[in-house]
Amino acid sequence: MKYLFLALAIISEVVGSSFLNASQQFTKPIPAIVTVVAYGLCFYFLSIALKTIPLGMAYAIWGGLGIILTAIVSVVIFRHSLDLPAVLGIMLIVAGVVVLNVFSKSMSH
């Protein structure tokens, strides 16, 4: 259940970031409203997840998956392109999240 709230936080953050781009610097009201609501939900769900998941682990997963999913949305929906350094950087972030979760003794599961 704890990872469900973290997943909802990640999804809400990706929605918020996507609509932030669509709001065109908050000049379009509907995307701007969706952005604010999505970020509010994001931090609400993250706060619930932090009751049972250590901050470092939750933030690593939230940040890492948020970056990956936002990059995918950027490519698929907004037709932005990712060059090789961007892809390599994202892969390094994923590797970092895996190392933290699988091998780190400082992250209590």
Image: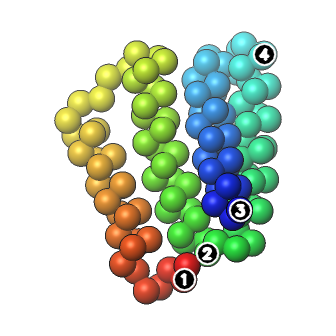
Discs 4/1, front? 1
Q: Which residue is drawn at 29% across and 55% down?
A: 92
Discs 3/2, front? 3
Name the residue beneath numbered marker 4.
Answer: 29
Of the numbered discs 1 and 3, the one sitting upstream in the chain is 3
Q: Where is residue 15 in the image (x, y as percent from the top left)?
A: 64, 32
Question: Mark 1: which amino acid?
Answer: Ser
Q: Residue at x 41, y 62 (%)?
A: 97
Report, in whole angstroms, how far the alpha carbon at label 2 lies from the one at label 1: 7 Å
Name the residue beneath numbered marker 3.
Answer: 1
Along the horizontal axis of the image, is 40 left or right of 91? Answer: right
Question: Mark 4: which amino acid?
Answer: Pro
The tag on residue 43 is none
The tag on residue 54 is 2
Along the horizontal axis of the image, is 62 left or right of 36? Answer: left
Discs 4/3, front? 3
Q: In this view, does 32 lie above or below 5?
A: above
Q: Residues within 10 Å of mark 2 (few under 14, many from 20)?
A: some
Location of the C terminus by quadrant is bottom right
Report, in whole angstroms, how far the alpha carbon at label 4 lies from the one at label 3: 34 Å
Of the numbered discs 4 and 3, the one sitting upstream in the chain is 3
Report, in whole angstroms, how far the alpha carbon at label 4 lies from the one at label 2: 36 Å
Helix, strand, or loop for circle 4? helix
Q: Residue at x 67, y 49 (%)?
A: 9
Quick check: marks 4 and 3 in contact, CB under 8 Å? no
